[in-house]
């Protein structure tokens, strides 16, 4: 098997997932390694996301096969090539993947079960939304090995309060799904046997909205977060004005005035 074919098998792609048109589910497929992010898995997930970006997909779900969502980087692989250049390239590759998720026009939902540790927890934090099983656990545990989880700290500190994020980073301790929801790392927590149904409900709600508004809104949301408030408002004004000129928004507002469902909901 060549490298491309082998990498492709590390991520399975399901279109119209959960029976919902427009929903694509990408499943990390290294169950025996708790879906640790090997170089091959990073490449396969990057390729799958690149394909989705230019597709008509409306929502993307990222899941893990087997007993866990993702256990972070593949430590055996990392330890086998100890050089500064290698580690810089590896973490840059992972960062590219994380930023691809944020830059996708489609909302990305993490479907979390088992554990999400280190870069796996980073992956949850970088997804736009997250639904977790009530038995899921989360940690940025690199510090326990003498390695501060620097790259996971970037999205973690943008999801949790500073003190909550830093406590996770400095202790490496696990938090459960309930605390992850309380701290803002995940949106919803449900029993494991209801996980797929809850992901499907969230995806269905998003798919019912005009794609132009969802895509423009996601892009605006992340860009304005990094700005001062005046610049954020300037960007928001321009985005909202352009959105208002879109046919779907004009139809939605007219439908509200006419007290009828908008045409794109029918």
Image (cartoon, grey):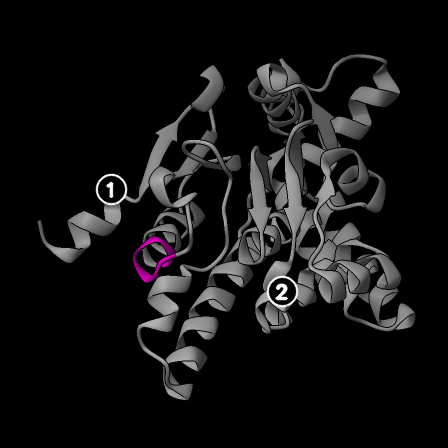
Identify residue for label 2: 144
Task: Give the label on residue 9, or none.
Answer: 1
The secondary structure that dominates the magenta segment is: helix
Q: Position of residue 38 (x, y in %)?
A: 36, 58
Q: Position of residue 162 (x, y in %)?
A: 85, 63
Q: Is residue 95 visible?
A: yes
Would you say 180 lies left or right of 7 here? Answer: right
How packed mark 1 is, by other alpha carbons closer than 10 Å (few <14, some 14-19, many 20 or more), is some
Residue 207 vs 156, above or below: the answer is above
Would you say 160 lies left or right of 121 here? Answer: right
Q: Is residue 224 visible?
A: no
Quarter of the rendering containing residue 130: top right
Do the residues bearing badges 2 and 1 touch, measured as CB atoms within 8 Å?
A: no
Residue at horizontal 72%, vertical 64%?
169
Sequence-earlier tag: 2 or 1:
1
The label nearer to you, 2 versus 1, is: 2
Residue at horizontal 74%, vertical 46%?
185
Front-lying residue, 113 or 54: 113
Residue closest to the far bottom: 84
Quarter of the rendering containing residue 206: top right
Q: Position of residue 251 (x, y in %)?
A: 72, 28
> Which residue range is magenta in the image?
38-42
Residue at horizontal 57%, vertical 68%?
145
Q: What distance separates the C-alpha of mark 2 from that of mark 1? A: 32 Å
Q: Position of residue 173 (x, y in %)?
A: 71, 53
């Amino acid at each position: 098997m060549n490298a491309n074919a082998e990498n492709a098998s590390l991520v399975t792609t399901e279109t119209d997932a959960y029976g919902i048109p427009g929903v694509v589910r990408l499943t990390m497929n290294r169950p025996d390694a708790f879906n640790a992010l090997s170089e091959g898995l990073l490449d396969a997930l990057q390729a799958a996301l690149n394909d989705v970006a230019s597709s008509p997909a409306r929502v993307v779900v990222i899941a893990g096969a087997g007993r866990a969502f993702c256990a972070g980087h593949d430590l055996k692989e990392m330890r086998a090539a100890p050089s500064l250049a290698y580690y810089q390239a590896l973490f840059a590759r992972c960062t590219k993947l994380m930023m691809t998720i944020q830059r996708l026009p489609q909302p990305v939902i993490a479907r979390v079960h088992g554990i999400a540790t280190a870069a796996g927890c980073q992956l949850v934090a970088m997804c736009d939304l997250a639904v977790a099983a009530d038995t899921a656990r989360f940690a940025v545990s690199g510090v326990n090995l003498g390695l501060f989880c620097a790259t996971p700290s970037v999205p973690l500190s943008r999801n949790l309060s500073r003190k909550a994020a830093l406590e996770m980073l400095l202790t490496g301790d696990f938090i459960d799904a309930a605390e992850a929801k309380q701290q803002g790392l995940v949106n919803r927590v449900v029993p494991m046997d209801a996980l797929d149904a809850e992901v499907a409900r969230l995806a269905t709600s998003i798919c019912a909205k005009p794609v132009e508004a969802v895509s423009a809104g996601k892009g605006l949301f992340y860009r304005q977060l990094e700005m001062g408030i005046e610049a954020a408002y300037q960007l928001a004004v321009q985005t909202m004005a352009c959105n208002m000129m879109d046919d779907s928004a004009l139809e939605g507002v007219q439908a509200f005035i006419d007290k009828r469902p908008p045409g794109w909901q029918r």
